[in-house]
Amino acid sequence: MTLNCAIIDNDQQSSELLKNYIDTSPTLLLTTVFLDAKAAAHKICCEDNIDILFLDIEMAQVPGINLIHNLHSKVKSIILITTQPLYAVKAFELPVADFLLKPISFPRFFHAISKVERQHCIQRKMPVHRKEDFFIRSLNNYNKLINCRYDEVIAVEVRGKELQLHTRSQTFSTLLTMYEMEAELAHREDFIRVHRSFIISKRFIDNVQDNVVTMKYLDLKFTIGDHYRKNLFDYINSKILKPKKKA
């Protein structure tokens, strides 16, 4: 399944970043980029071949809100782009699939695309495939391909210039980068990044104390980065069993 994409964004830097993300996604095809909202609205209204429209809600010429109402019947899915978090709330009231906050990270982009792809599969009554495993190339032996199951991955760690993949049985060093590994795991809800150098599996968390998370296997311990602390503890707090207050 290939999904045709279009971008409406007068921010050229943002458009180039999205273009690069789309070009690296095998299921996406970028058909056009519009820097002018009026020209975009006219052309899209005359065509019917856009599956995903990335729309900047803060366009100067024509407000993105107006474009949504004019174009949502002409495209299959709209993903909003914005610099303002407050528009995230409005997104729930609009006929859009998701929103992306600038500067757009690849994992967040990947999450939005995965969500839209699932919706398209359901609409077309196509099976949604969930990969159970993957192969990585060994850092020490390029010709050696190692099979890994997602449900056995404990953590991903950058150590020096190496990327290490910790599983329940052993640790592998791979040629992949953290950026590539994060993108691969972005479609899985059971992984969370806790530090610029660490991604961990939620299912293998043993305990969290102060600023350290300890995993259930291999005696692995990881420091929680300040930037990632809130995200991790939001997840943990949602799982805490709290005693009922005594009357």
Image (spheres, rainbow, N blue to C red):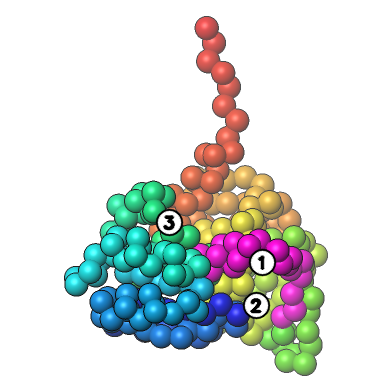
Q: Is residue 198 left or right of residue 64?
A: right
Name the residue at the bottom extreme.
143
Helix, strand or loop at mark 3? loop
Judge the density around disc 2: few (<14), some (14-19), many (≥20) Cα neighbours within 10 Å. Answer: few
What amino acid type should be assigned to the residue bearing mark 1?
Arg
Is residue 207 shown above or below 151?
above
Helix, strand or loop at mark 1? loop
Which residue is found at the position 49% from the left and 46% from the top? Answer: 233
Q: Quadrant of the N terminus?
A: bottom right
Q: Which mark is first along the chain, 1 or 3?
A: 3
Q: Is residue 205 left or right of residue 64?
A: right
Helix, strand or loop at mark 2? loop
Q: Which mark is residue 95?
A: 3
Alpha carbon separation for disc pair 2 and 3? 23 Å
What is the span of residues highlighted in magenta in the rendered image? 112-136
Name the residue at the top extreme.
247
